[in-house]
Amino acid sequence: MTVPPSLAVPARRISAQDIESYASLTGDYNPLHLDAEFAARTRFGQPIVYGTLLLAPIWETLAREFGGAALEGARAAVEFKRPIKVGSLLHMEGVLVESDSESTTYRFVVNDGHGGVAVDVNVILAVGGP
Amino acid sequence: MITFDQLKAGQVLGEVILPVEADFLRAWAALFPGSLEAAGEHLPFGLVAALMMRGYIKILAERPSGNVHVEQGFFWGARVAKGTHLVVRLSCLRKELKGDRRWVWFANQLDSTEGVFHARSTMKFLWAA
């Protein structure tokens, strides 16, 4: 398997409509994501994006690059470090951490739009490089 | 409402069978255009993760408002073929009170109704009540 040093994830702006769609898919109507008045009373100040919604483009990128079978047996550790406000333009990138004959590790970072790391994702694929 | 005090480490919270209906697939395709086609005969991994969240939400329907999801782990098993009947099982792994912060960890497993393992997830929340 060829292991690129980095993996680009297409940038995406998460709209309020996206949040409503994801709420209907998961059934999660936590007002922290959907209710501006509720969110304004929290430390976040305004509605924030669902964490697992942010991960979907990362899974898509890995599956596109290596094929869906490469994710079978994969492990991922995800840390939601900072909130991402609804309406933010998301920039994500994966960087190769290491690869040997048995596994390949990428670290993906989702930026919060202000130079900080919002989400940190370490993915270990159970497939090796060359 | 399920409060922090009611949750117990090691507690099995329930299971739910999850139908993957045409409406669900259409809604996913609208959110992530092209992803269903790219996944071929399988479901996209992001959609599977959303299904696992749906299972968690259904099993733990009476949650306090304002819970914050802070960490998640995934272990992916076999890809989910379109048309597979799925079941999610949820348990409470542990909980911890630190100052006024209520931390709760859950384990969420997705299998087919025929017993094929598809995914396991752990989730850490700051519990609101």
Image: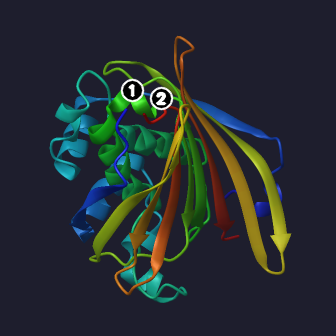
- Identify the image quadrant of the C terminus of chain A: top left
Q: Position of residue B100 (x, y in %)?
A: 79, 80
Q: Residue at x 37, y 54 (%)?
A: A5
**Chain designation of label 2:** A
- Identify the image quadrant of the N terminus of chain A: top left
Q: Secondary structure at mark 2?
A: loop
Q: Position of residue A85 (x, y in %)?
A: 37, 78
Total label count? 2
Q: Is residue B52 depicted above or below A111 in this figure?
A: above
> Which residue in the protein does label 2 denote?
A72
Q: Position of residue B123 (x, y in %)?
A: 62, 52
Q: Residue at x 83, y 64 (%)?
A: B96
> Which residue in the protein does label 1 denote?
A69
Q: Secondary structure at mark 1?
A: helix
Asked whether the residues under the numbered discs 1 and 2 touch, taking CB atoms below 8 Å apart as contact, a structural biologist would say yes
Q: Does residue A24 appear anywhere in the picture?
A: no
Q: Are marks 1 and 2 on the same chain?
A: yes
Q: Residues within 10 Å of mark 1 (few under 14, many from 20)?
A: some
Q: Residue at x 23, y 25 (%)?
A: B40
What is the quadrant of residue B98 in the picture? bottom right
Check disc 1 and give the amino acid type: Ala
Check disc 2 and give the amino acid type: Glu
